[in-house]
Image (cartoon, rainbow, N blue to C red):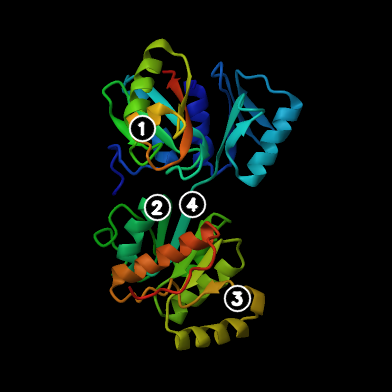
């Protein structure tokens, strides 16, 4: 791969732009395709370019034309927005980073949202609706509210449900969640929007400790992202 | 975890490419291996990448660790002669047992030199 193509690939990732890299396996010649832009030393036919765009749409890497070409789709990074710089978040942040997410934590309570509690993490101390406006969740973003405080969680949920975020989760007991749905209904959200909330957030793995709850939320986000079939009920050994 | 520039064994594709750029900047020779096709229960999906430098430092993965040794050897060769390579590993191939892809899957890996 030419250095200029590597740089262009990294720039596309930085700009959160989906791109495809087409490689002629025999020669190693390559073409980077982003929308109508093309860059590289490989001349591709119109029909091949058409196939590339179809694969980009399907987000599917693989061999083309009997293995003559390899196409790799590079998608923008996954993002996780956490509302609440709480104990569970301290466990969830490193897990999500390991799983490849760019993580942002929102909490206007400055005593909680500290560098010491969240080393190397992007912290936003605005009110959640302002912070969500700045972050602009897209279809590769998950949003989880963990404060239990309606003043903080609700405005973030309203913004999340008006975005294409692939996962929206809200921590809290079944009763807390029922009251939350009532409040959001009063704000004018319809049932289809409310049904997008995973509440109480997380898979039912009997989690108790903060790190266990973080695991259950991380697992649920992964299941939704990868469109996993519904899990079979757990059995005792 | 907190923004260290050091290579991480668990790096995803983004980190692999960023690391490639950093290594090239340092003047290292670098090759990139990418899974281009899989059959059966291969451990890493199409698009998974392993970055190798001229001192056998590795970032990322193209299997669960079974074929990395063989891939690194080909990556070193690609660094020298600049020719891309397409490697086949699988149960139908005797080499698969030698390199240890005993999981029953097969996988094609493309190896290319990164130009400085």
Mark 2 neighbour density, 10 Å: few (under 14) some (14–19) many (20 or more): some
The CA distance from mark 2 to mark 3 is: 26 Å
Sooner in the amino-acid sequence: mark 4 or mark 3: 4
**x and y percent of residue B29 in the render?**
34, 19
Query: Of B8 and A36, which appears nearest the observer?
Result: B8
Judging by the rendered image, the residue that carries numbered circle 3 is A195
Q: Residue at x 24, y 60 (%)?
A: A116
**SS class, disc 1:** helix
Q: Is residue A181 above or below residue B5?
A: below
Chain ID for label 4?
A: A
The CA distance from mark 2 to mark 1 is: 31 Å
Chain ID for label 1?
A: B
**x and y percent of residue A108 in the render?**
39, 69
Judging by the rendered image, the residue that carries numbered circle 1 is B97
Judging by the rendered image, the residue that carries numbered circle 2 is A99
Mark 3 neighbour density, 10 Å: few (under 14) some (14–19) many (20 or more): few
Which marked residue is nearer to the observer: mark 4 or mark 2? Answer: 2
Sooner in the amino-acid sequence: mark 4 or mark 2: 4
Tag of residue A78: 4
């Amino acid at each position: 791969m030419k250095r200029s193509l590597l740089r262009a690939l990294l720039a596309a990732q930085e700009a959160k732009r989906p791109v495809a890299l087409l490689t002629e396996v025999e020669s190693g010649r390559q073409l980077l395709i982003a929308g109508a832009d093309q860059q590289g030393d490989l001349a591709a036919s119109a029909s091949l370019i058409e196939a590339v765009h179809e694969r980009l749409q399907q987000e599917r890497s693989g061999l083309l034309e009997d293995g003559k070409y390899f196409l790799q789709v590079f998608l923008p990074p996954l993002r996780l927005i956490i509302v609440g710089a709480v104990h569970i978040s301290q466990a969830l942040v490193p897990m999500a980073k390991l799983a490849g997410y760019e993580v942002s934590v929102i909490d206007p309570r400055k005593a909680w949202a500290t560098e010491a509690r969240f080393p190397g993490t992007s912290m936003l101390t605005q009110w959640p609706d302002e912070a969500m406006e700045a972050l602009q969740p897209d279809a590769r973003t998950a949003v989880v509210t963990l404060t239990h405080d309606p003043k903080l969680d609700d405005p973030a949920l309203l913004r999340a449900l008006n975005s294409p975020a692939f996962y929206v989760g809200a921590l809290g007991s079944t009763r807390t969640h029922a009251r939350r749905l009532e409040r959001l209904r009063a704000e004018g959200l319809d049932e289809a929007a409310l049904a997008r909330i995973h509440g109480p957030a997380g898979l039912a793995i009997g989690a108790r400790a903060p790190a266990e709850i973080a695991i259950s939320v991380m697992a649920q986000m992964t299941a939704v992202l990868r469109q996993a079939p519904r899990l079979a009920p757990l059995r005792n050994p | 975890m907190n923004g260290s520039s050091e290579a991480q064994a668990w790096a995803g594709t983004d980190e692999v490419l960023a690391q490639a750029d950093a290594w090239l900047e340092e003047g290292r020779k670098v090759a990139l291996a990418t899974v281009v096709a899989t059959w059966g229960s291969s451990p890493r999906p199409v698009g998974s990448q392993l970055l190798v430098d001229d001192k056998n430092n590795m970032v990322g993965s193209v299997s669960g660790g079974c074929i990395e040794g063989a891939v690194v050897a080909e990556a070193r060769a690609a660094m020298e002669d600049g020719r891309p390579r397409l490697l086949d590993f699988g149960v139908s191939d005797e080499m698969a047992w030698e390199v240890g892809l005993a999981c029953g899957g097969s996988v094609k890996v493309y190896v290319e030199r990164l130009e400085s």
